[in-house]
Image (cartoon, rainbow, N blue to C red):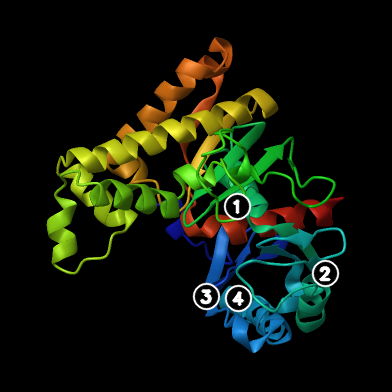
């Protein structure tokens, strides 16, 4: 059983207790952990962003109470709640600014409204920063002093933890490493944010599908053609399946994605000099559990070895994250714990 599938009983738990909320564009995860970061309960509710932010804030507050009850606690026994949210945001003010995946939620004081509904103090954080802290606290980075976490999905999220601190930046835009520039040419690929040459434009799931479709349209042979003719939709998962069967073009795309990520990882290593760099999210090509995932990681390391200072390439751990979709709420709870202990 993987770590993020394990729950402990209240009898085995070590107080105090903290709740974490991972607010996403589609779903919201809420869970309770003990002082050692071990989950006691978790539940998922739909975000339903079209109902507006106040409705969601009320349901998040209610979900904290339900998660506490599921863990065998009253809400009053939860010391503090962490809330991880997608950007853009003003973290000190506790506000969403213009969140891309939450249309109509602009300038909403989400921290204070959720606090009002759950009647508990809230620690507000960027969702990627919260996930990074989860991995740092109890995940693949638990032996690190600092880390960078890339979350690979539709876009590329990133969190940076240095010495028990999430690097959020002066304007709450720290660790936006999916938007580091890796191609400065005039013809660089266009990122979803509207700017050119960003890592996300080359190594996100969106970019992988776009690059593959361009090669298929150009007439390159691939076993994927037969799958698409059968009505299958082109996705990273389908591409990975064909790559595992030996399809040359699919393997080429995976290797090229690893190369671009290697460039991005090297930039962060030279900027932060972290103990480790972790890769998580939905597009890790199976991670450590698959031959393709392990090859993907090996290709990233090879690119880093070609580009990074030799000492950094030798001493920096590069690996997959281990908490999966639970990293966000566990990390949010962990950041709440930090604030409670100050």
Asked which secondary structure carries label 2, the reply is: loop
Q: Which mark is residue 131?
A: 1
- As measured in the structure, the alpha-carbon distance from the residue carrying label 3 to the one carrying label 4 is 10 Å
Residue 233 placed where, x, y %?
Answer: 27, 65
Q: Are marks 3 and 4 in contact (CB under 8 Å)?
A: no
- As measured in the structure, the alpha-carbon distance from the residue carrying label 2 to the one carrying label 4 is 16 Å
Q: Name the quarter where the N terminus is drawn.
A: bottom left
- As measured in the structure, the alpha-carbon distance from the residue carrying label 1 to the one carrying label 2 is 20 Å
Of callouts 3 and 2, which one flags the residue occurring earlier in the amino acid sequence? 3
Front in this rendered view, residue 254 or 69:
254
Residue at x 33% of width, y 53% of height: 236
Q: Are marks 2 and 4 in contact (CB under 8 Å)?
A: no
Asked which secondary structure carries label 3, the reply is: strand
Of callouts 1 and 4, which one flags the residue occurring earlier in the amino acid sequence? 4
Q: Which mark is residue 67?
A: 4
- As measured in the structure, the alpha-carbon distance from the residue carrying label 3 to the one carrying label 2 is 21 Å
- As measured in the structure, the alpha-carbon distance from the residue carrying label 1 to the one carrying label 3 is 16 Å
Mark 3 or 4, closer to the camera: 3
Left or right of 98? Residue 255 is left
Front in this rendered view, residue 80 or 111:
111
Residue 175 occupies quadrant: top right
Classify 10 Å Cα crowding around label 2: few (below 14), some (14-19), many (20 and above).
Answer: some
Of callouts 2 and 4, which one flags the residue occurring earlier in the amino acid sequence? 4
Front in this rendered view, residue 150 or 329:
150
Mark 1 or 2, closer to the camera: 1
Residue 200 placed where, x, y %?
Answer: 53, 47
In the rendered image, the vertical position of residue 122 relative to residue 318, given as above or below: below
Mark 2 or 4, closer to the camera: 2
């Amino acid at each position: 059983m993987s770590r993020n599938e394990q729950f402990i009983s209240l009898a085995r738990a070590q107080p105090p207790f903290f709740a974490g909320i991972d607010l996403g564009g589609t779903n919201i995860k809420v869970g309770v952990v003990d002082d050692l970061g071990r989950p006691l309960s978790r539940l998922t509710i739909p975000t339903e962003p079209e109902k507006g932010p106040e409705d969601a804030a009320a349901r998040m507050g209610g979900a904290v109470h339900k998660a506490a009850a599921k863990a065998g606690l009253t809400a009053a026994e939860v010391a503090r709640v962490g809330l991880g949210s997608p950007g853009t945001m003003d973290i000190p003010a506790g506000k969403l600014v213009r969140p891309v995946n939450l249309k109509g939620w602009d300038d909403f004081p989400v921290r204070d409204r959720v606090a009002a509904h759950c009647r508990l103090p809230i620690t507000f954080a960027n969702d990627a920063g919260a996930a990074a802290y989860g991995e740092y606290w109890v995940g693949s980075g638990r032996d690190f002093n600092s880390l960078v976490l890339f979350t690979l999905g539709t876009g590329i999220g990133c969190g940076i933890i240095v010495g028990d601190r999430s690097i959020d930046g002066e304007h709450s835009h720290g660790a936006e490493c999916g938007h580091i520039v890796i191609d400065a040419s005039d013809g660089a690929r266009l990122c979803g944010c509207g700017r050119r040459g960003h890592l996300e434009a080359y190594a996100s799931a969106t970019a992988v599908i776009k690059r593959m479709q361009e090669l298929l349209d150009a007439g390159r042979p691939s076993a994927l053609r037969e799958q698409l003719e059968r009505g299958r939709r082109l996705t990273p998962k389908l591409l990975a399946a064909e790559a595992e069967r030996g399809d040359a073009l699919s393997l080429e795309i995976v290797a090229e994605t690893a190369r671009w990520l290697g460039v991005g990882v090297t930039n962060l290593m030279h900027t932060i000099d972290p103990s480790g760099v972790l890769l998580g999210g939905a597009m890790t090509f199976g991670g450590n559990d698959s031959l393709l995932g392990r090859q993907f990681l090996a290709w990233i390391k090879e690119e880093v070895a070609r580009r990074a200072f030799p000492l950094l390439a030798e001493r920096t751990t590069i690996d997959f994250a281990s908490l999966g979709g639970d990293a966000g709420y566990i990390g949010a709870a962990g950041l709440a714990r930090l604030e409670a202990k100050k």
